[in-house]
């Protein structure tokens, strides 16, 4: 009888503990991927000078804060998109090792970046994206970055 009580207690504790810990990383990975998707799509649209594509990924009244020579330059995300006009140069912004944090309907992406102009490093720094989940869709609510000369590779 004691053995049955012990097994019942052990089983109850196991059930209270919830699903195995291995389930959590796959859920976190899929959430991270969902949060990163609009950030990556934003850079892809930017490299094509696709203002409509960029605009579809942002809250237009959100803010961009760009730190330039120690001073903040602030503009609405809609204005930021307006500044990305087709030019002769090929542009590309690459992030690496993004850190994603999510709580319910808000998320933050922090990542070092490198900006390429005609395939060559132009500047680098850190990007920070604030995102909001609106009607089930992650949208960029704010961008902050800094900029500096990149070390030669």
Image (cartoon, grey):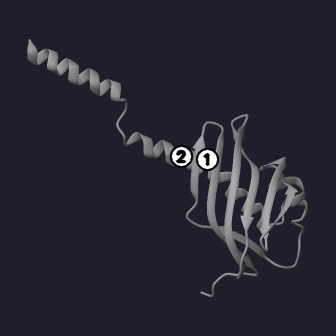
**Residue at the image position 91 percent from the left and 60 percent from the top:** 82
- Residue 38 in the figure: left or right of residue 96: right
Instruction: Give the quadrant of residue 48.
Output: bottom right
**Compared with residue 91, is residue 104 higher up or lower down, i.e. above or below?**
above
The picture quadrant where one finds residue 31 is top right
Residue 17's place in the image compared with 150, above or below, is above
Point out which mark residue 15 bears: none
Pick the front one: 18 or 142: 142
C-beta proximity under 8 Å, tags 2 and 1: yes
Residue 34 disc label: 1
From the viewer's perspective, is 31 left or right of 49? left
Question: Dot 2 surroundings within 10 Å: few (below 14), some, or many (20 or more)?
Answer: few
The image position of residue 64, as x and y in percent, is 80, 57
The residue where tag 2 is placed is: 30
Dot 2: element: helix
Of residues 12 and 33, which is closer to you in this image? Answer: 12
């Amino acid at each position: 009888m004691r053995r049955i009580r012990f097994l019942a207690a052990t089983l109850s504790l196991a059930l209270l503990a919830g699903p195995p810990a291995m389930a959590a990383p796959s859920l976190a990975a899929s959430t991270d991927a969902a949060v990163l998707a609009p950030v990556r799509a934003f850079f892809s649209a930017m490299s094509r000078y696709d203002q409509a594509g960029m605009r579809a990924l942002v809250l237009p009244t959100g803010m961009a804060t760009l730190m330039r020579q120690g001073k903040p330059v602030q503009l609405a995300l809609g204005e930021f998109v307006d500044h990305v006009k087709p030019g002769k140069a090929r542009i590309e912004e690459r992030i690496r090792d993004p850190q994603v944090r999510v709580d319910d309907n808000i998320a933050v992406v922090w990542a070092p970046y490198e900006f390429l102009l005609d395939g060559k490093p132009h500047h680098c720094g850190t990007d920070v994206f604030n995102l909001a989940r609106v009607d089930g869709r992650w949208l960029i609510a704010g961008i902050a970055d800094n900029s500096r000369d990149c070390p030669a590779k």
